[in-house]
Amino acid sequence: MQGACLVGTGAELVTVEARFEPIDRKRTEVVLTGLPDCVLRESRGRVVCALEENGLGLAPGRLFLNLVPAARRKSGEILDLPLALCAGAACGSLDPRWLRDTLFLGELGIDGRLHAVPGGLATAAAAREAGIARLIAPPATAREAACVPQVDVRGARSLAEVVAHLAGGRPLARLRIETEPAEDPAPGPGLDEVRGHAAAKRALAVAAAGGHGLLLVGPPGAGKSMLARRMLRLLPPPGLEERIEITRTLSAAGRWPGGLARARPFRAPHHTTSYAGLVGGGSTPAPGEVTLAHRGLLFLDELPEFRREALEALRQPLESGRVLIARAAGRLDLPASFQLVAAMNPCPCGYRGHGRVVCTCSPGRVEQYRRRISGPLLDRIDLRLELSAPSLAELTGEPGPGADGTSEERLRGEVLGALQRAHARQGPRPNARLQADELDRWVPVEGRVLDLLERAVAARQLSARAVQSVRKVARTVADTEGSEGVDERHVAQALAMRNNWP
């Protein structure tokens, strides 16, 4: 019969085999093989107690339980229910034919009650891919699994309900989930509450429209974190497939949101987060923050304070949208298509170039501080903007969109229009992931554009990746303005939003 185990953000099917040998002894000996972890080994006691409590006690003898494939480690309590049912069938209490073409999952209490387990959506997706038409799980897990179409999902509160359903006595009701619409826009404080920072708001819109990374540099209190946390309001609501991806990722990590996710994730790990916590890994490989931010935003405040090896590990997912983790226990290929927004101070004390507060940092300390972010990582962040401290007039003025054209409604309209134009031109990929041949087609370098880029390369020593990045941003700027072509004005705006500092 079929069970499943979680692996990263997905699930792998596990076949449970059982054989019972009646021998003359006082009790039943349960032997579990197939590389189970300590939680699974302890399930032998839970299974025996649950079966006895429900009138399916095992006769004295030796019960062999095997998990296939035997060479892969199995973990978690998710296999309790299939182990119990398979044991009952091996001992003659259940008809083995009842267990065919059905995936079972759930944690068993010693009284036979079923407890929810993470990964319902991931296991349902694995069942659909394997051609398994039915799934039975605890109610909370079943409600999540029901979000996957083409799978007959039933929820059961106890082992007794499962047995009664299989025997045809009291059928379990099939779950049908009516998905709630996605949040539009994402919940949270609005961008119109931010006073001033017109250039930063426009940079947020360009980043949202093209999927570009964004670095905000400024003194303490300039509004870096405030702006970053409001960028989610400019992004479109996730589509159905994106919502399934987000929910699958969160559920497999034990963070099921209770139904399909309605908004894009926003992750803001502290700068003391370890390498494994940020990127994923550990002795038993698990997803990190970059995976939990899949299809959403990853905000790294105080960027230079993060561990250098953790920051360097961001280079692969920023390029490919995935993280490959290789350990002795196995390999994990995890989704990590996130949008990076980072913030930092201009120097260790934070007040270099402030204007009203004197910086106390020596040039050597400033240089050392800036070098905590490597050139290759910085090169992969398309937009880099300096923020100044807000003036008293801005702080005490009336909040609202103002007359500078940066109202949230207008910017969001520009973002949605740009995304529609990009989708019609190149499909679902954002401008930040355009390839060289596509840039040659949609952002040709000729005439005044060529002259401007030549001067920028000479003055700023731009790398080849930086030049391509400027072209991608210019394409996004043109999309936000509704322009089919890219001219020197769009390239100039892209260069202005890619400050060479630090």
Image (cartoon, rainbow, N blue to C red):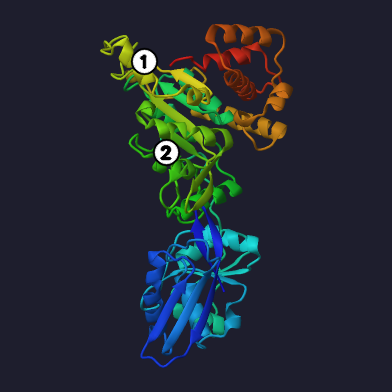
The dot on residue 367 is 1
The answer to whether one can see residue 341 in this image is yes
Q: Secondary structure at mark 2?
A: loop
The dot on residue 188 is 2
Nearest the camera: 132 or 24? 24
| Residue shown at the point (44%, 27%) measured from the top left | 192
Nearest the camera: 16 or 344? 16
Using the image, determine if residue 121 lies above or below residue 387.
below
| Residue shown at the point (49%, 15%) measured from the top left | 499
Q: Does residue 490 appear to the left or right of 345 in the view shown?
A: right
Nearest the camera: 208 or 132? 132
Using the image, determine if residue 229 lies above or below residue 4.
above
Q: Position of residue 63 (x, y in %)?
A: 46, 82
Residue 219 in which image quadrant: top left
Q: Position of residue 481 (x, y in %)?
A: 63, 21
Mark 1: which amino acid?
Glu
Nearest the camera: 195 or 208? 208
Tell me how far mark 1 sits from mark 2, CA to CA. Answer: 37 Å
Mark 2: which amino acid?
Gly
Q: Which badge, 1 or 2, comes first in the chain's sequence?
A: 2
Residue 456 in which image quadrant: top right
The answer to whether one can see residue 392 in this image is no
Q: Does residue 4 appear to the left or right of 227 in the view shown?
A: right
Quarter of the C terminus within the rendering: top left
Disc 2 crowd, CA 10 A, few/some/many (<14, 14-19, 20+) = few
Using the image, determine if residue 10 lies above or below residue 381.
below
Q: Does residue 484 appear to the left or right of 247 in the view shown?
A: right
- Which tag is nearer the camera, tag 1 or tag 2? 1
Q: Position of residue 430 (x, y in %)?
A: 62, 33
